[in-house]
């Protein structure tokens, strides 16, 4: 995790930091120790260190989210040779990225109550498949975790990634599936969904996603162009929706396949 990411995490959770010289010195030492954890030992140990760091900073707050992220090794879903456990987004080709670990953790926390065993979850812009795999572990074999991306090569890559991960058996039994499609239209086959996550910023919330959200369900989506906010959309039992802003964010845009390949 970079120092700037640590500061952003602290600001996000409203922690006011008093940077006197002693605290700054101790923080630098702590940062060096954590980096040493990231780059020594096995991939599993590095992934565990990443999760523990997110817990220390209050981004991961629940045992279930920690267990899911601990079980799904991020390195299997990051580009070969990349700094997989750094707290930063990474390009994955086709003008797409895999989100930073703190954003994955934030979205999992926001959706945790809607990712219970047996529930249905949709991941729009599933990319390399990381968050879809986490969803699958949380909803289990009796649930459904669906990933949708409009880049066929990314879907093919994500299937191979998931096969190597702890979520592989769920892909094999069909409770986890990854499809090529325009995620702005959702995936009606397994609707309604208890949880929907969108991994790119839409200019406005797509109506099909709200329509496919189950009463009592929750949608987490970045919205905006130059200025983006992470929106949390809760659907009430009567079908009405409540929209709240969680935080300011920066994502790649949610566009057509053609626009994405052109570079938006």
Image (tube, rainbow, N blue to C red):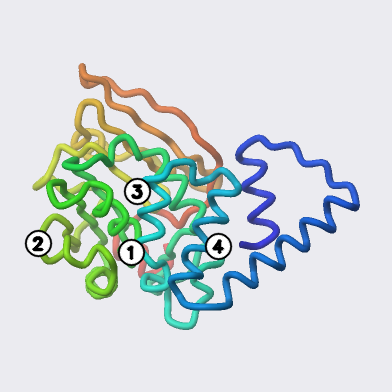
Closer to the camera, 152 or 191?
A: 191
Q: Distance of mark 3 from mark 1, alpha carbons?
A: 11 Å
Q: Nearer the viewer, mark 3 or mark 2?
A: 2
Closer to the camera, 46 or 83?
A: 46
Q: Which mark is residue 173?
A: 2
Q: Which mark is residue 88?
A: 4
Name which of mark 3 and mark 1 comes first in the sequence. 1
Q: Distance of mark 3 from mark 4, alpha carbons?
A: 18 Å
Name which of mark 3 and mark 2 comes first in the sequence. 2
From this viewpoint, which residue is outermost toward the top? 238
Q: Position of residue 231 (x, y in %)?
A: 43, 36
Q: Which mark is residue 127?
A: 1
Q: Position of residue 49 (x, y in %)?
A: 53, 63
Element at label 4: loop
Q: Residue at 64% x, 69% y: name it.
A: 35
Q: Distance of mark 1 from mark 4, alpha carbons?
A: 16 Å
């Amino acid at each position: 995790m970079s120092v700037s990411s640590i500061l952003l995490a602290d600001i996000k959770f409203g922690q006011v930091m008093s940077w006197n010289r002693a605290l700054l010195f101790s923080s630098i030492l702590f940062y060096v120790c954590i980096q040493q954890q990231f780059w020594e030992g096995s991939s599993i140990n590095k992934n565990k260190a990443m999760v523990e760091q997110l817990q220390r900073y209050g981004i991961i707050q629940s045992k279930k989210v920690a267990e899911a992220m601990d079980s799904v090794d991020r390195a299997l879903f990051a580009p070969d040779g990349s700094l997989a456990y750094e707290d930063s987004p990474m390009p994955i080709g086709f003008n797409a990225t895999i989100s930073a670990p703190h954003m994955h953790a934030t979205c999992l926390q926001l959706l945790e109550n809607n990712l219970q065993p047996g529930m249905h979850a949709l991941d729009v812009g599933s990319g390399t498949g990381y968050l879809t795999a986490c969803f699958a572990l949380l909803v289990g074999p009796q649930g459904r975790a669906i990933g949708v991306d409009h880049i066929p090569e990314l879907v093919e890559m994500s299937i191979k990634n998931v096969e190597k991960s702890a979520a592989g058996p769920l892909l094999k039994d069909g409770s986890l599936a990854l499809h090529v499609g325009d995620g702005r239209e959702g995936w009606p086959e397994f609707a309604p969904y208890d949880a929907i996550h969108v991994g790119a910023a839409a200019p406005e919330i797509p109506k099909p996603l709200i329509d496919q959200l189950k009463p009592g369900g929750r949608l987490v989506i970045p919205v905006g162009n130059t200025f983006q906010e992470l929106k949390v959309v809760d659907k009430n039992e009567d079908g009405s929706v409540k929209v709240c802003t969680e935080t300011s964010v920066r994502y790649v845009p949610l566009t057509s396949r053609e626009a994405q390949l052109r570079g938006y």
